[in-house]
Image (cartoon, coloured by chain):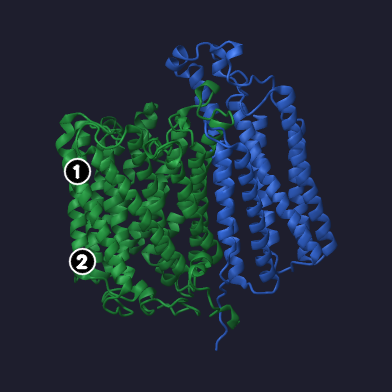
Amino acid sequence: MSDNHHHDHPTGIKRWLFTTNHKDIGTLYLWFSFIMLLIGGAFAMVIRAELMYPGMQIVDPNFFNMMTTMHGLVMVFGAIMPSTVGLANWCIPMMIGAPDMALPRMNNWSFWILPFAATMLVAPMFMGGHFMSGQGPAFGWTFYEPLSGQNDKLAFFVFAVHLLGISSIMGSINIIATILNMRAPGMTLMKMPMFVWTWLITAFLLIAVMPVLAGAVTMMLTDKYFGTSFFNAAGGGDPVLFQHVFWFFGHPEVYIMILPAFGIVSQIIPTFARKKLFGYASMVYATAAIAFLSFIVWAHHMFTVGMPVAGELYFTYATVMIAVPTAVKVFNWTATMWKGAMTFETPMLWAIAFVILFTIGGFTGLMLGVATSDFQYQDTYFVVAHFHYVLVTGALFAIIGAVYYWLPKWTGHMYDEKLSKLHFWMSTISVNVLFFPQHFLGLEGMPRRIPDYNPMFADWNFVSSIGGFVFGASQILFLFIVIKTIRGGAKATSQVWEGAEGLEWTVASPAPYHTFENPPAIK
Amino acid sequence: MAEQKYYLPQPSHWPLVGSVGLFTTTFGFAMALPSKSGDPIGSLAMMYIGMAILAYMLFGWFSTVIRESESGKYNAQVDMSFRMGMMWFIFSEVMFFAAFFGALFYARQLSVPWLAGADPGTNELLWKGFEKSWPLLSTPEMAVKPEAELTFAKAKDVIGAWGVPFYNTLILLTSGVTVTFAHWALKKQNRSALIFWLLATVVLGFLFVTLQAGEYGEAYKHLNLKLSSGIYGTTFFMLTGFHGLHVTIGATMLLIMLFRAIKGHFTPEHHFAFEAAAWYWHFVDVVWLGLFIFVYWL
């Protein structure tokens, strides 16, 4: 049926609006997430500017709260999640020898909901008088009831989350169907690249928990506008119920953001260590174990809410158990590098930084996971430092590494090695200047989500802000490098990296519009 | 040239139309909900326009897919992708209901007992005199506030399990059987039996919805049992309401299958759309059993 192929696709804007091509859609996802990264980053700059000195300097408290809230929401739902979906779109079909995603039109829909959802999310910021008094979400990215219920424009937030959820669920269904149904003959499950495995499990997590998040925000909506009492004790409900429902989504959500990063690092390290991934099977099982455990540890986010002691103990033990499969992964990455013929191209630098810095975030996670010590750290900057180590130097570093790793395959050009190394070192030094002092601030007792603070916290906040501005500026350099690579540069070979293995390195660079029209042979 | 194995669909404008529809609907709805600066009339108009766009998208997108399917473009692999898509979609729906069942169990097992004194501080300080019961007709607020100041509607009674809800259970279970008869007929190429059993299923489905709507009217008018009757009314209406919505969607899907069956669509080997609708129908059936047991009966 040759008419199924080589059909002309529309050009210009219509190409991007109507596309069913996994590479086009991957590109859309990646650019969307990059724009969101810069917007969320701008919000972070406002936060760091206000916190640079004690006292109120730049913004009023409501606007500050809006910045912390929107920074979190935009980064989680706009930057990290869509970027990994973009990578999945670009890479999974090529890695498993498929012509495209299983459900290409739905793939288009998954993406094109996102800009509308983002518009819905930021719209209330511009409602209600002047900008500083906007009515955008200002209740923290975790939108705890009953505080969130007091927001006048709550419905916009609720529907934004619904739209994001629809997008994520359809995207995940597509990824699962692609992986389970579109693999080239011979590509057995245990031959799949780790990135594919991690996304298979991530997609399962997404389908399992995004509907629960949809349920949570629906309950918020009906509580506020239709008189229900899910989170209202006067009617027999309980605001703590919100936290349970939210974190039943929220804890798997953190693995939704980090598992694809694990997959990326498991692709990059073997390439530049020129060795096969150490302990492939254990890597697969560890990923599955982490996913399973992620469903039964949610209340470690709410140790101080008032829980029975048995609950505190159970959630402590279950939580620290996650350290076991995670340690298996860190061990395997290290063992892969052990006695490898290592070279340090830019993607490898990001991957190594990931292994070290993510592990720091993992260790502070253990400290927070133990109820008795968490009582001390709850709601302090220590928590902020912890999750920025796992999400910035963890998820984001891996994603940036992935961009450098696959950029030659996507564009056909090598990136500027000097500039990219500058980008790496600027980012890695500044991100530690930015977040490491926040551990100290937290241990000293500085609460999170405040625009002003006791002068005793002034010194480290100043240091942190300087780190923040440099880290922010470094990402502008990243944007410049990406654009420069798209526009030109040394020609990339099909193989790109000497030690790279996998089907995506067997096709030309840039990868042809339709990759595999007939199934490739798998060794 | 060897026969090509893969099928790739043409680019399509329907997804974008769907996104515009979703956005218009929800943005209009959000603006219509009570707020200081809302403009309900214009906002509601926006919402209805959005819904019309969504309906147009669903009609257009499915027409395209049906046309492509009937012209034999879809191979076994595409069929399997559709199956997986539907299966995981239903799984996501299960998880959506799980959130609300979770809220129900939490209220029954934890929050109501706590408010009634299992957690002594809360009861002593805030809701002195509140006692636990299920179905919860008297909310904590009613224990401490005079009748005139109540924010919750005081329900006189609840809908019993063994009246209409029990008949509705029989209706849904029967419809699960009739849809299976329809499937058998389809496989045996007995078109008139297919149409008959499918029609029976659709009728039973809409009968269920009608009876349910009657119960809602009864609850609101005579029992004063409302969404705002505290946590019992909340969980009762939210769970049965979302279920009713899903029954309506499922019955509509089956109705479309009925029209397609009348038009001569489907072959014994190739009838995934029918199966998807049937799976969905069994899903709403199973959810109902959970509802009947935990919302109405126990």
Residue shown at 52% from the left, 44% from the top? A159
Q: Which chain is green?
A: A
The mark total stands at 2
Q: Which amino acid type corresponds to the residue marked 2 in the rendered image?
A: Leu
Q: CA distance from mark 2 to mark 1?
A: 24 Å
* Parent chain of label 2: A
Placement of A86 over or under A248, stated as above or below: below
Q: Which amino acid type corresponds to the residue marked 1 in the rendered image?
A: Ser
Label 2 crowding class (10 Å Cα cut-off): few <14, some 14-19, many 20+? some
Where residue A294 appears, x then y in whole percent? 40, 46
Placement of B149 over or under A215, stated as above or below: above
What secondary structure is found at the residue carrying circle 2?
helix
The single residue placed furthest to the front in the displayed view is A130
Where residue A244 appears, x then y in whole percent? 45, 35
Q: Give the quadrant of residue B195.
A: bottom right
Which hue is chain B drawn in? Answer: blue
> Between A138 and B173, which is closer to the camera in this rendering?
A138
Q: Are marks 2 and 1 on the same chain?
A: yes
Which of the numbered marks, if any, corresponds to residue A464?
A: 1
Q: Is residue A499 left or right of residue A242?
A: left
Residue shown at 43% from the left, 63% from the top? A28
Q: Is residue A124 left or right of residue A364?
A: right
What secondary structure is found at the residue carrying circle 1?
helix
Q: Which residue bears the numbered disc 2?
A: A419
Where residue B261 appears, x then y in whole percent? 78, 62
